[in-house]
């Protein structure tokens, strides 16, 4: 991302601290695309510490709409698409939901 673009974003969103920003150059031949892993890293390493510094006597609740990562599940999540419906195929280890 060019400095010109970053400057424009800084002016468009002046209330978002620079420390909270994550820049990603999207594309197959670049840095890839925004994923749930990127989101988790940004929340874990940036957003939580900024929140705690600004609101030390509060508890944060972070909630996200998973629409941009519809296929994002834990590796061992019970997902119908991953279940084996025919004998003889490999079955991934999934956790019981009970």
Image (cartoon, helix red, strand yellow):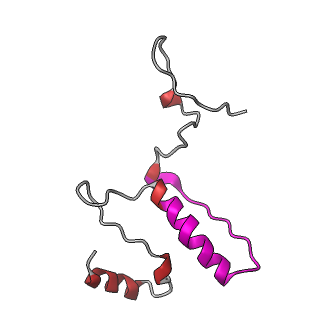
Residue at 51% x, 22% y: name it: 91
Q: Can you tell which quarter of the image residue 45 is in?
A: bottom right
Q: Residue 78: horizontal and vertical position, in percent? A: 59, 33
Q: Quadrant of the C terminus?
A: top right
Residue at 37% x, 71% y: name it: 23
Residue at 35% x, 67% y: name it: 24
- The answer to whether 24 appears left or right of 38 in the picture is left
Is 15 in the magenta? no
- The answer to whether 8 appears left or right of 67 in the picture is left
First to last magenta residue range: 39-68
Q: Is residue 38 above or below residue 86?
A: below
Q: Can you tell which quarter of the image residue 47 is in?
A: bottom right
Task: Give the residue at the far left of this rendering.
Answer: 29
Task: Give the residue at the far top of this rendering.
Answer: 87
Q: Residue 41: horizontal and vertical position, in percent? A: 51, 62
Is 64 in the magenta? yes
Q: Is residue 82 above or below residue 75?
A: above
Q: How many marks?
A: 0
Q: Is residue 88 above or below residue 15?
A: above
Residue at 25% x, 54% y: name it: 28
Q: Residue 29: horizontal and vertical position, in percent? A: 23, 56
């Amino acid at each position: 991302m060019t400095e010109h673009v970053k400057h424009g974003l800084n002016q468009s969103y002046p209330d978002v601290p620079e420390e909270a920003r994550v820049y990603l150059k999207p594309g197959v031949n670049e840095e890839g695309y925004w994923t749930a892993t990127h989101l988790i890293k940004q929340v874990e390493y940036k957003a939580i510490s900024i929140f705690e510094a600004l609101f030390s006597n509060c508890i944060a609740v972070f909630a996200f709409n998973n629409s941009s990562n519809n296929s994002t599940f834990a590796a061992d999540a019970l997902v119908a698409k991953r279940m084996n419906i025919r004998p003889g195929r490999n079955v991934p280890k999934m956790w019981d939901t009970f």
